[in-house]
Image (spheres, helix red, strand yellow):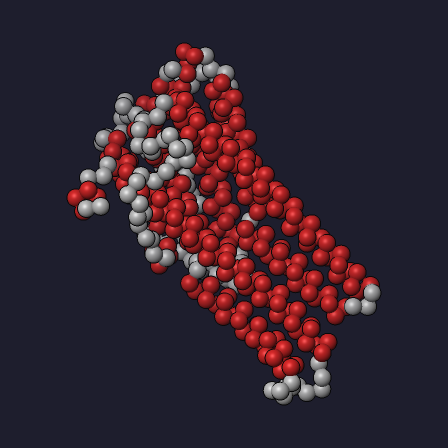
Amino acid sequence: MSEEARFERTTLENALRRYATFDDAANAVQRKFFGAKIWILTVGVAATTLAIVYSTLWLEDARPPLTDGHFYLWLAVVAMPIIGSVLAAGAAKLIRGLDWVSLRGAAESIKREVYRYRCQVGVYSPGSQVPGTRDEKLASMVEQITGRLLDTDVLATGLPPYSGDEVPGYGSRTDDGLSDLTPAQYLDWRLADQRDWFKGKSVTLESRNSLYQWAIAILGGVGTLLAAVGQEIWVPVSVALATALTSYLTQRNVEATLAGYTRAGLELDNVVTWWSGLSAEAKGTRASFAALVNRTETILGSENATWVQSMQETLAQLPDGACAACGQMSADDAPEDDVPVDETEAAEEDPTGDPMAEEDDEAVG
């Protein structure tokens, strides 16, 4: 694409490409971070196992001769802790776990602004009292969200720009990502898509968590059995495996994430139920559409804010301290709805008379 064509992109196209840049970078850092953690845990288990195997074959020499096969086993026993230390040091220095959390929060913040823009609600509505055009307001919000990352260590990650010529996809193949949305399109392409995603991920996480928890319990039983039959020397292996699985679950923050996803799915279901109960006349008003979008985006923003804060706290407490000194976007800054309140729209009464609206705001706020 020529330089001229790049500068001819609309504000919305640029916002979508910024979202894609943060999204791709977050995925890349996440894969590297947890890939390194898995290798570190694997090496730790291997080191424990090799040490026990060697101790059962230990001869009398502290250092077997080079020609003896035991030397290579001894070398592996010595090398494994060193390899683990090198991996831990390298991961702590080069792969900052909080980077992907901050990038994910920024990407989702931009995504929420894009949907508000396309639905023309809040400060993007035609009757907004906030000065500036719709494009100017979107550009300002993207700049603010991006600006938060400038105060973190994310800059050291490197952010390769989105390289595709097409506008980044937005879930539905029939959604071009640029057109203004009708209530029916928003319900299908945003609300239902996110609700189904949360529900699907909840099922996956619950199955994974149950599998790991059973494996940890079984390993504990195996350790007890080994001790009972006089094979105490192998108990550290089962303990190491159980500890590795527990550490992995902790690093992934599975239980807190599962609770957040389940909550978000149920709250989005409540919005669908509320919308279905409206009359055809009420559904056709701008105020009802604005209420639909604002309630949905508030739920998504609240879920993301809770997730960011929970992940920051979890990663900051990792034993190796890999994330303790990292600069990060605070949970208050990253995912909350940052559009200035439009007093005109905020002053409108809920045209649906929905008695649950206030309770929902409290629940997701």
Residue at 55% across, 35% down: 199
Describe residue 176's horizontal placement relative to residue 208 as left or right.
Answer: left
Above or below, comparing residue 133 to residue 223 in the picture: above
Question: Measured from the top left, where is residue 284 in percent x and y?
Answer: 38, 15
Residue at 59% across, 75% down: 76
For residue 210, which quarter of the picture?
top right
Question: Measured from the top left, where is residue 131 in percent x and y?
Answer: 23, 30
Question: Measured from the top left, where is residue 310 in percent x and y?
Answer: 51, 47
Along the line of sight, which residue is nearer the eye, 63 or 320? 63
Along the line of sight, which residue is nearer the eye, 190 or 314? 190
Report whether residue 342 is seen: no
Along the line of sight, which residue is nearer the eye, 66 or 327? 66
Question: Measured from the top left, where is residue 344 in percent x and y?
Answer: 32, 23
Describe residue 79's horizontal placement relative to residue 339 as left or right.
Answer: right
Residue at 59% across, 52% down: 249
User: Residue farthest to the right?
Assistant: 229
Above or below, comparing residue 124 to residue 21 in the picture: above
For residue 223, which quarter of the picture?
bottom right
Report whether residue 11 is seen: yes
Along the line of sight, which residue is nearer the eye, 143 or 193? 193
Q: How many marks?
A: 0
Describe residue 150's horizontal placement relative to residue 335 as left or right.
Answer: left
Above or below, comparing residue 140 to residue 242 in the picture: above
